[in-house]
Structures are given as structure tokens and as C-alpha cells.
Amino acid sequence: MFAKRTQEVEPFLAMEVMERGMAMARAGTPIVQLGVGEPNFDAPPAAVQAAVDSLVSGETHYTDSRGLFTLREAIAQDCEKRRGVAVDPDQVVVTSGTSPAILLCLNLLVDPGDEVILATPHYPCYPNMIAVCGGKPILVPTSPQDGFVMDVAKVRDAITSRTRAIFLASPANPTGAVQPKEVVEELSDLGIPILSDEIYDGLTYDGATVTSPLCFTENCYVLDGFSKRYAMTGFRLGYLIAPEIAMLPLQSLMQSFFISTSQFVQQAGISALARGAEHVEHMRRQYAIRRRILVDGLRDMGLSIPIDPPGAFYVLVDMRHFERDSLPLCFDILDKAHVALGPGRDFGEAAEGFVRFSFATSREEIEEGLRRLARALPEL
Ligand SMILES: Cc1ncc(COP(=O)(O)O)c(C=O)c1O
């Protein structure tokens, strides 16, 4: 009855754990939610005010499909500031979140039967979106012992005549890995378009720095947005930066799929870029404290975290010694410890037996989650 490609889309299991947790909470059992990757911070006040002002002044219309020129100009300047690479505002397309930016790029590059290489563990939506475009995800494993750094030789071996793109996510969900500069440079030199998901850039710790392939190749599509760095998930605001040659087809896809991004939300983006830096730095410092508490707390319980995650707000913990699949394990933890976590299976087979903890929630919740887990551990 429904198109075959819908069967390729896997459900998001972290949501199932979260939703069962919410049902338990409604029935009177308070649950600590450490499973989802949503900042608990408010959006930058200046961004909220800009959206309100924009709505009140009647900015409720379509814009240029690529986005307001002022926002594209601000994004280009922000990119130049962070990357040291000059970008033309006409290389920017503003989208309703990073997710549509990913979908636009895959529709641009992937024909049925084409292949897209990505590291695993991986963000669950990548293979789903590749499959919906008729493409084949080609998974290249990474391991916790190596800090989930991509092995360029393995990527090279995975390239075939059907390879259309390589995903790079740095910092990554769910591993928090930041790819070293040499790896980014070598991947950029492979002659295949790089889809560089930079949504967690700015959220790095212990001096880790993010390198964009934009510094090495023009054959690169930067996928980015305001959800994580600016805690603006519900605004739905993202963008992509693409080679000039791709702009016309991308614009046509944007016009047909989405027409344009909300005007008042784009105004919020302009304000976030102009006045949000202090707020972003405040959040980053808080994440750094929460990360220390979470990583140290989990290690104190004897759980294995080979390398402190250098970026994003996740810790992927190896729980294979429990000898159970990650989904039943997460349900068991929910039942016994009243803590909701993200089953590793969401992030590909390489993450089965692992569990993702998020430190995007408050310090108090993290501390309470650790206490509950420590108490329940002998029972698991
Ligand atoms: C790696 C990665 N890319 C993209 C997204 C989607 O973000 P957005 O809210 O901008 O659509 C997420 C959300 O969790 C993510 O973790």
C-alpha cells in the first residue's frame, strides 16, 4: 500500500524509550531523561525578541527560496570568521533546520543505486535519508579505542564507481568524536563530494578544535544550523553552504520542496548570529561541567568510556558486558533505575551493546540520573 522506500526508514528507538518514560512519569513515577539530544537551555533572548518583533511587524510571508539576503550574508560572514574561508552569500541556502539541508543535498547528488559512505556509529537519519533517495549507505566502522576517528584507508577502500558522497560529522552524534585536521584533509583529497555536518561545531571541550573540509576543497557541502549551538531546536532553522555550481539545482529543489523558510524565524537567526555569542559560550561552559560530572560518574561505576568525548553533548558507553541488546537493556534501566537512555542500536550495528547518554540536560538531572543508575546497577 505504501511506497517501498518507507520500509527502509528505521524507527528512532531513543524516542520509544523516552515516550515510555513519559508515560511512566504521567502515571506518577518521575523519570530522569538522559536519552535525547535536546539542549535544556532557552534560546538566546535576542533571537526570541527578534522573532516576536518580526511577527508583530507582519513579517509572515514567503521569502527568497534561498533565504533572506541579510541572513545569508551573516551566515557567510560567520563561516569566514570560524573557518577563515571566504564564502559568497549566494552559496548559502537557508532551510527549516539542518535536516532539510541534508535532504536537499542527498536529492541533489544521489540517484537510485548510488552509494554514500558514512562512519558508523552514525546519526540515525543519514542512512534513512540516503535510502529514501534510493541510495545505498556504505558503513565504515570506527571504534571507541581510536576515539571514533575515521580510518581514511577504509574509506578509500569503500569507494566504487557508484560513490556519490562521503558524510563527515565532526563533532559527531552519538560519539562526540572530533575528526583530526589530517583526516579531514585526506578525506577532502579523495575527489568525492563531502557532506560535512557541522551542527555541533562550537560545542567542544578540553581545547578540541573542529576543522571543516571547506578549508581544503570546494567539493564540499556544509550542513549546519541553529538547533544545537544556539539551543534553537524548535525554531527549525538551518542552512547549507554549497559549491556555486550546485546552487541552481539546489534552489529549484528548495522551491519545490519547501518554498522558503519562515521569515520571522530567519530574523531570529540574524539576531542569534549578531548577538548570541555570549549565550553560546555560557552554554558551552555549562556543558563542559556537565560532561565532567557524567563521564567521571559513569567511570566511577566501572563503566567503560575509553576517551572523553571531545565534542557535542553525548557519551557513548560500552555496555556489551551486560550481554544484552541495547533496546531491552535501556527498557530494563528505565524500569529499574527510572532513567531514560538512548539505545546504541539507533546508531547502527557497530553501536549495538552501547548506550548513549546525553548531557544536554541540567546538572541536577545528570547527578540524579547517576545516583539512580548506581543504585540499580547490581540488579541489571
Ligand atoms: C548530527 C545531527 N545532524 C542533524 C541533526 C538535525 O538537526 P536539526 O534540528 O537542525 O534538523 C541532528 C539532530 O539531532 C544531529 O544530531
Image (spheres, rainbow, N blue to C red):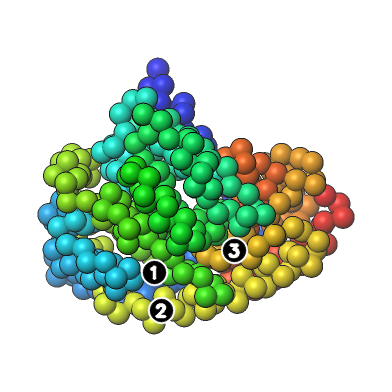
Q: Which circle's residue, 3 or 2, is located before the other in the chain?
A: 2
Alpha carbon of mark 1 to alpha carbon of mark 3: how far? 20 Å
Kindly identify which numbered label has been placed on residue 347.
none
Residue 322 x %, y %: 80, 46
Residue underneath mark 1: 230
Judged from the image, the secondary structure of the residue bearing numbered disc 3 is loop
Residue 376, image x and y in percent? 82, 57
The crowding category of the residue bearing disc 3, from other C-alpha atoms within 10 Å (few below 14, some 14 to 19, many at least 20), is many
Residue holding disc 2 = 279
Q: Amino acid at mark 2?
A: His
Q: Is mark 1 within 8 Å of ligand 1?
A: no
The residue under label 3 is 309
Percent x, y of residue 282: 46, 80
User: Which one is in front, 217 or 346?
Assistant: 217
Q: Are marks 1 and 3 in contact (CB under 8 Å)?
A: no
**Up-down relation of residue 21 to residue 257 (above or below):** below
Pointer 1: residues within 10 angstroms few (<14), some, or many (20+)? many
Relative vertical location of residue 86 with respect to residue 380 in this rendering, above or below: below
Image location (x, y in percent) of residue 124: 50, 43
Name the foreground residue: 273 vs 340: 273
Identify the residue at horizontal 21%, vertical 73% (top origin).
Answer: 53
How much space separates mark 3 and mark 2, taking CA atoms?
22 Å
Which SS class for mark 1? loop
Position of the N terminus by quadrant: top left
127 vs 17: above or below: above
The amino acid pointed to by label 3 is: Pro
Query: Could you tell me the amino acid type at mark 1?
Result: Tyr
